[in-house]
Image (cartoon, helix red, strand yellow):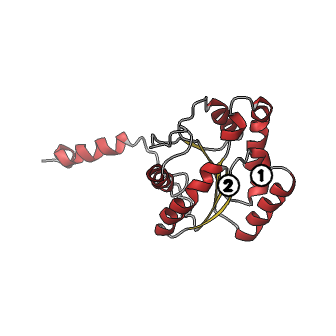
Amino acid sequence: MTFTGCPWFWLGAALLLAQDGAPPAAAQPKPPKPRRVVLIGDSLAVGLAKPLAAELGARGAALQVRAATGANAGAFTEGSGASALGALLADFKPDVVLVSLGTNDTVPGAEALAKKLPARFALLASPKRLGGARVAFLEPPALPWSREPIHQAAAYARAPLIVAPAIEQERDRIHPTGAGYAAWSKFIAGRKEIFP
């Protein structure tokens, strides 16, 4: 039997032809797992602080939080709030910045704040400001009003939006319960935007 008559020869030839002579694709390096995470935001971030710190701590990351009940995006992009955030980013040097804002900017009657949201989100996602940190915006859990302006603002900032899962909420239909915050924190900590 000739060499070309061997079935293994033709199988090998077929495999080579299937590759079209292309070299194997180079594997894209994954970004390193974060060790320092900053969370900024409103009352939802206040509620996330403790359970998210526990979830991230279990993954070897530390969490710093700057949040205030009633905060809108302007609280971190203007005046003393912007200065305080800048100092935190410079000192802590986070790998990831999570932004939980927009709920108070989009509440019915806050049309003036909603109009400013895209520019403020873009400023929060500015690479120059972040010093190399990745940024991700957190969609709030289901609200009694539309979350679409938050989606649009995150898209305008060209930053990922981590869509909130369905979680247990308080009777106000805005804030999660304790169990809801725990489930949301676990979901956030498991996202590829945070831990690739």
Query: Is residue 37 rendered to the left or right of residue 153?
Result: left
Q: CA distance from mark 2 to mark 1?
A: 8 Å
Provide residue 111's location: percent of width, then percent of height.
Answer: 76, 29
Image vertical order of residue 162 relative to residue 151, above or below: below
- What residue sits 36% from the left and 41% below the top? 17
Residue at the far front: name it: 171
Bin the neighbour count of mark 2 within 10 Å (Cα to Cα): few under 14, some 14-19, many 20 and up. many
Provide residue 59's location: percent of width, then percent of height.
Answer: 48, 66
Q: Nearer the viewer, residue 158 or 106?
A: 106
Provide residue 191's location: percent of width, then percent of height.
Answer: 49, 51
Query: Is residue 41 rendered to the left or right of residue 12?
Result: right
Residue receiving disc 2: 40
Which comes before the other along the chain, label 2 or label 1?
A: 2
**SS class, disc 2:** strand
Image vertical order of residue 10 relative to residue 68, above or below: above
Image vertical order of residue 96 relative to residue 75, above or below: below
Q: Nearer the viewer, residue 94 or 85?
A: 85
Q: Are marks 2 and 1 in contact (CB under 8 Å)?
A: yes
Which amino acid lies under the numbered mark 2 shown in the image of this protein?
Answer: Ile
Residue receiving disc 1: 76
Q: Nearer the viewer, residue 75 or 77?
A: 75
Provide residue 187's location: percent of width, then percent of height.
Answer: 46, 51
Which amino acid lies under the numbered mark 1 shown in the image of this protein?
Answer: Phe
- What residue sits 50% from the left and 54% below the top? 185
Query: Is residue 87 rendered to the left or right of residue 144?
Result: right
Bin the neighbour count of mark 1 within 10 Å (Cα to Cα): few under 14, some 14-19, many 20 and up. many
